[in-house]
Amino acid sequence: MAQIWKDDEVSLEPLKGRKVAVIGYGSQGRAWALNMRDSGIDVVVGLRPEGKSWKLAEQDGFKPKPIPEAAKEADVIIMLIPDMAQPEIYEKYIEPNLKEGDALVFAHGFNIHFGLIKPPKYVDVVMVAPKSPGPKVREAYEQGRGVPALVAVHQDATGKAWDLVLAIAKAIGCTRAGVIKTTFKEETETDLIGEQTVLVGGLMELLLKGFENLVELGYQPEVAYFEAINEAKLIMDLIWQYGFYGMLKRVSDTAKYGGLTVGPKVIDEHVKENMKKASERVLNGEFAKEWVEEYKKGMPTLNELMEKVKNHPAEKVGKELRKMMGLEE
Ligand SMILES: NC(=O)C1=CN([C@@H]2O[C@H](COP(=O)(O)OP(=O)(O)OC[C@H]3O[C@@H](n4cnc5c(N)ncnc54)[C@H](OP(=O)(O)O)[C@@H]3O)[C@@H](O)[C@H]2O)C=CC1
Ligand SMILES: CC(=O)[C@](C)(O)C(=O)O
């Protein structure tokens, strides 16, 4: 059984009197900085002055500082810039400013697990990995809720790393939902496998192919969008809130019968075999090596694939329909 901590079992005390530098103000960085500040934590935001997020952080009431300055004045340094950007920034601006007893905090274990960042022995190295996109980390906190997270300690130089990592999870609201004890290895491998085969890769491919199938059959793109994409969120909401059986209890009997008998023929055993192949590439380090090389080349493949998604017919019709529904663009 997993070791899980809830809000009333965790104290913010280990963060009292400490200065926290949130490095990065993007998907996770903005949410963490705002949530920690609202939890009464002393937060400084570390950014590159020439970047776009400097102004956003100022608009949110922070006084951002250049990364080395923020790292120097803080004793808890939270790495919330893109994974591939972390090793160079760490080497140039973070490591030279680490002092005995400091804590280095990650939201994903990639760089520690694959040895791309090797912290000195005299600092704590911990992780709070929200199982949620950054903006939802903030939204849940503002609603008095939290998103679940995984917590891990890679290095406990002070003997107090576990108290600290739990306090950080509490300060961003995650203990309100619950946090599970893990390792950098388990978090990294499950996050990579999950985002590739299910959450981003698998789900997007399924929805886009479902849309394409309906359009190729001659149906209106608007109808295809509402059926295969827009309603998917509503079904996922039911699964999120009531589980699979609860969702089934809330859809029609026709949908229950059709879904339960046809679904396994569409998502057949080949899918599982393909998931295993993708998982193997994560476990043996092939994916990590490929991603580091892609980043070093300036991400040509990623940029090309992003353009392909941006120009997909579902995006065109979806933009119009989201505007019609008053969803933010
Ligand atoms: N996105 C998510 O929902 C999740 C992310 N994570 C993890 O959280 C960490 C942060 O990810 P995420 O929030 O997505 O990152 P983002 O891509 O949203 O980070 C953007 C921020 O990083 C800064 N930045 C980008 N490149 C550089 C650079 N080369 N040097 C300095 N600053 C830079 C940007 O500043 P500027 O304005 O100057 O460009 C901006 O402030 C990662 O480890 C990720 O794996 C974990 C769970 C979920
Ligand atoms: C939101 C999340 O946890 C992801 C999809 O794994 C990520 O953005 O890294």
Image (spheres, rainbow, N blue to C red):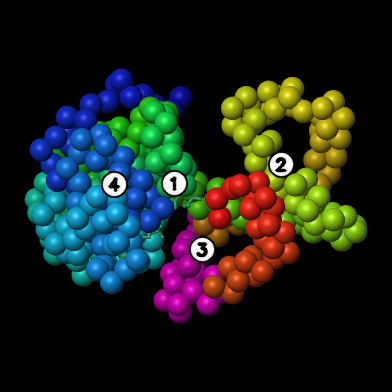
Residue at left offset 14%, top offset 35%: 16
Q: Earlier in the sequence, mark 1 or mark 3?
A: 1
Q: Residues within 10 Å of mark 3 (few under 14, many from 20)?
A: some
Give whichever of 89, 316 is nearer the camera.
316
Name the secondary structure under disc 4. Answer: helix
Residue at the outermost top position = 8
Does the numbered disc 1 mark a residue whose Cβ is under 8 Å from ligand 1?
yes
Q: Amino acid at mark 2?
A: Glu
Residue highlighted by disc 1 = 135
Residue 190, position in %: x, y? 50, 46
Name the secondary structure under disc 1. Answer: helix
Q: Amino acid at mark 1?
A: Pro
Q: Earlier in the sequence, mark 3 or mark 4?
A: 4
Residue 36, position in %: x, y? 27, 40
Q: Earlier in the sequence, mark 4 or mark 1?
A: 4
Which region shows up in magenta? 283-302
Q: Earlier in the sequence, mark 2 or mark 4?
A: 4
Q: Is residue 205 above or below residue 306?
A: above
Q: Is residue 152 above or below residue 214?
A: above
Q: Is residue 39 left or right of residue 218?
A: left
Residue 64, position in %: x, y? 21, 58
The question of residue 221 being in magenta is answered with no
Residue highlighted by disc 4 = 33
Q: Is residue 27 above or below residue 252?
A: below
Residue highlighted by disc 3 = 287
Residue at left offset 44%, top offset 72%: 295
Viewport quadrant of the C terminus? bottom right
- The secondary structure that dominates the magenta segment is helix
Q: Earlier in the sequence, mark 3 or mark 2?
A: 2
